[in-house]
Amino acid sequence: MPSMVHTLPASSTSDPSGAVACRPMAGTTHVFQAPKGTRDFPPDVMAVRRHIEQAWRSASIRHGFDEIDGPTFEHLDLYTVKSGDGIVSELFSFRRSGGDTDYALRPEFTPTLARMAAAKGKSLSIPTKWFAMPDLFRAERPQKGRLREHRQWNVDVLGVAGPEADAEVIAVAVAGLRGLGLGPDDIRVRISHRGAAAGMLTALGVPAERIADAFALVDRREKIPADAFATQASELGLDAAAVRRLDDIATCRRPASTPPTDLAEEHNLPPDSVADLTALSTELDRRGLLPFCDWDLGIVRGLAYYTGTVWEIHDAEGTFRAIAGGGRYDQLVELFGGPTVPACGFGMGDVVLALLLAKRSLLGDTTASLLPRPDVFLVSSGDEDAEALLVPMATSLRDLGLHTRHTWKATRNIGKQLKEAAANRARTAVILGDELKGGAVVVKDLDSGEQHDVPLADLPAWLPRRLAGADR
Amino acid sequence: MPSMVHTLPASSTSDPSGAVACRPMAGTTHVFQAPKGTRDFPPDVMAVRRHIEQAWRSASIRHGFDEIDGPTFEHLDLYTVKSGDGIVSELFSFRRSGGDTDYALRPEFTPTLARMAAAKGKSLSIPTKWFAMPDLFRAERPQKGRLREHRQWNVDVLGVAGPEADAEVIAVAVAGLRGLGLGPDDIRVRISHRGAAAGMLTALGVPAERIADAFALVDRREKIPADAFATQASELGLDAAAVRRLDDIATCRRPASTPPTDLAEEHNLPPDSVADLTALSTELDRRGLLPFCDWDLGIVRGLAYYTGTVWEIHDAEGTFRAIAGGGRYDQLVELFGGPTVPACGFGMGDVVLALLLAKRSLLGDTTASLLPRPDVFLVSSGDEDAEALLVPMATSLRDLGLHTRHTWKATRNIGKQLKEAAANRARTAVILGDELKGGAVVVKDLDSGEQHDVPLADLPAWLPRRLAGADR
């Protein structure tokens, strides 16, 4: 860890060209840190990020989604048009020196996606299945599982109004998590539906014009004291019995194998309020997803743009924040000037997910075990012919596609080089030793310990075949 | 293309909360665009980026480099400490709303790398071989091949003072470009050496204290008129003959197979001024790199932190800006408070490279040909048993790791679905048709046209084997 946190001197805050004040004095040792709430990724940490991204990408591509991306910053008003000006304080916004255009680091990807879909206009394919893995930014105080910069997987289906699209994006999310080793005992998809929840609230006596307020209250339920919840619920027109029922419904979670009509009956809700969940249930079942899912009418999702199914993925024990959140947002593309397009999708960040994977011991014995393993570690006896061969052989093996390393130390002690090979987790060592006089090298399998003398001329064909075989 | 460019109304420039002024009127159709100098990446464009990144990553890993990354923005003074305050106008800098810390979007990766190396202090491995593929940002007017946001490959060796490290990073750069199909007729590595160039300038009569100014002048040579060059050169103490010799040397390019001592002789330079280039030449030769390289003492590199070998990669015809630039920077880690560590590396952006690949027709017939090909396209006859099987079969095949698609259209016309499969560039079609009555499906190889009846129960084993075989 750096020995000194670098901060601006207080005097610089009133200096418009603050940079002048924060230049170190000549000769001062000056240790910099990453900005608060952001991360450095040294190789072992980067390997975790790549491991997660690889699972995300693989699940996306298997399900037939095409990857997209957009700029890291957008026009500021791309965010204010949807969320109002209140969002500005949560954004990192800026202008170019001397410029008059306001930009913001992207806090979420959906507005970029909606903008790109809107720009396609009538030429947008139906359906459009897109995924992205952008870096996103929040100018908030960092908290556990919530940083100022994180990577987020986004998966969206545009153009399909039916529940098969909702089920498909849930299938991709679950496939991504299963690819990382998580099963139904580790993660739960908690599903609600804005329509079903609205039906429930109406049945309890909430007037139509207060439904949005009631959603906001249910969303806050776990964050405010019970009496504050009751007071605010009564202000929505609910009597004490209805408040208790509201709380019952919002806290009731049932396995998705429960027919939604049972849920409706249990809570005296109109049966047609759960028709969409029943249709979704069929689509989830076809994809083998019911064991991963729960009905949970307490899931609201803060964002105002959701219009139908809404869902979150949480760790099964409920230790962390949500791992992912998504739902249907049928009006969003239109809001950005595009055609009317039904749409659904989700976002899944890397921060909470990495915490859960670490807790479940799913990142290997050490995080270094996620680093790419060298195929070959070349070992030289130090003899003249071995030394002359070392770098050209490394070059040839790399040209064949093999991940090849050798020591950069002065030592030519074979035992020490084999130790370095093992520390690098190399799969094989190719030893340029006495056998060179007979035109051969020794290939040692560093997992099994097995050794083979291989003629130099055969090595380029023999080694890749051997390594491919060892994979099976 | 969007029909309307979104710009801020001029009145908003004097409004500190400019966001208010740029909200669209209710009911207005409002088409947003990506900010000037940034890019949207729809699937075909994203596929090009991934193609390039894949070649970069593969070359890095084969050569034993570990991937790292840092934050997208850093403390502003991380950049001013090295480059002075003049750089501030070239940066996108910002503060958090109400905060007093200045940040900047990273314009290059080397300061982040030096900061990360400095933070490791004495525990930094020798050598440290790192690569990264960050997004970088410049607040300049966008030009051809130079945007406000681009992706850049960075490869660095820390801890090795000898020319084997310089040759190794050049080898990685060339391997990355060869992985994209570029050969020595397409790209040239143009190599110089600050020491050799300083020796040349000294021999011409430039006093020691004006060497830095002379470098700056050589760097500007192609950008200023000949007479301005001559005037400024004479101000450095050069007579007319020396100015002509300076120009000769700076414009002289020789294949790297030419011994550097020949070059010295040709230009009446002291032979020991090219000793480092001679040592580098041996290391390039061991790696088979000489056919890609030229000696070019006109290469200076603008950045002040280079201390030894400096090089650029250009397209052979010299049509574009430099594709990559790099060199040795032995004092940089120390500048950021770390130990004294010799270091060298390079950066290669994606923008010029993509222009060259397109010009050389190395991006496929259409950019869509770089999109991942579906392994399977499922086709349903529309019969009840086929329809019941379609989604569960897609789910099983995806669980096996196969990229699986099916139509989302209402049509169940088999010919139309096969056409969609071909448009998706699927490798096979699995047809759920009349054969289902006998418990089989038809698998059609969409490249060869070959068809097989495969029993349903055999498909999960048969299809991946067939697809793997088709790869060979």
Image (cartoon, coloured by chain):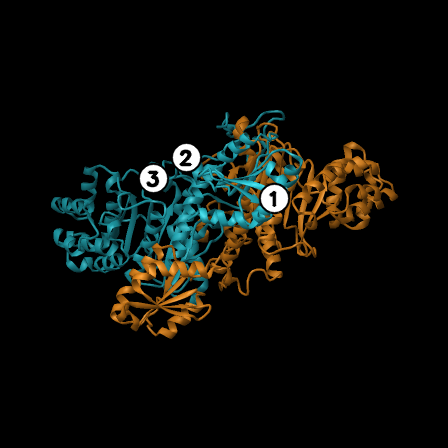
Chain colours: A cyan, B orange
Q: Indicate the amino acid at tag 1.
A: Met
Q: Indicate the amino acid at tag 2.
A: Thr
A19 left or right, relative to A227: right
Disc 3 packing (10 Å; few <14; some 14–19; many ≥20): many
On the same chain: label 3 and label 1? yes
In primary-sequence order, the first of circles 3 and 1 is: 3
A91 left or right, relative to B381: right
Residue B294 location (% of width, % of height): 72, 48
On the same chain: label 3 and label 2? yes
Residue at (51, 43) in percent of width and height: A375
In primary-sequence order, the first of circles 3 and 2 is: 3
Query: Is B389 drawn above or below residue B329 in the view shown?
Result: below
In primary-sequence order, the first of circles 2 and 1 is: 2
Callouts 3 and 1 close, C-beta under 8 Å? no
Q: Which residue matches tag 3?
A: A356
On the same chain: label 2 and label 1? yes
Cα distance, mark 2 to mark 1?
31 Å
Q: Nearer the viewer, mark 3 or mark 1?
A: 1
Q: Which residue matches tag 2?
A: A366
Query: Which chain is disc 3 placed on?
Result: A
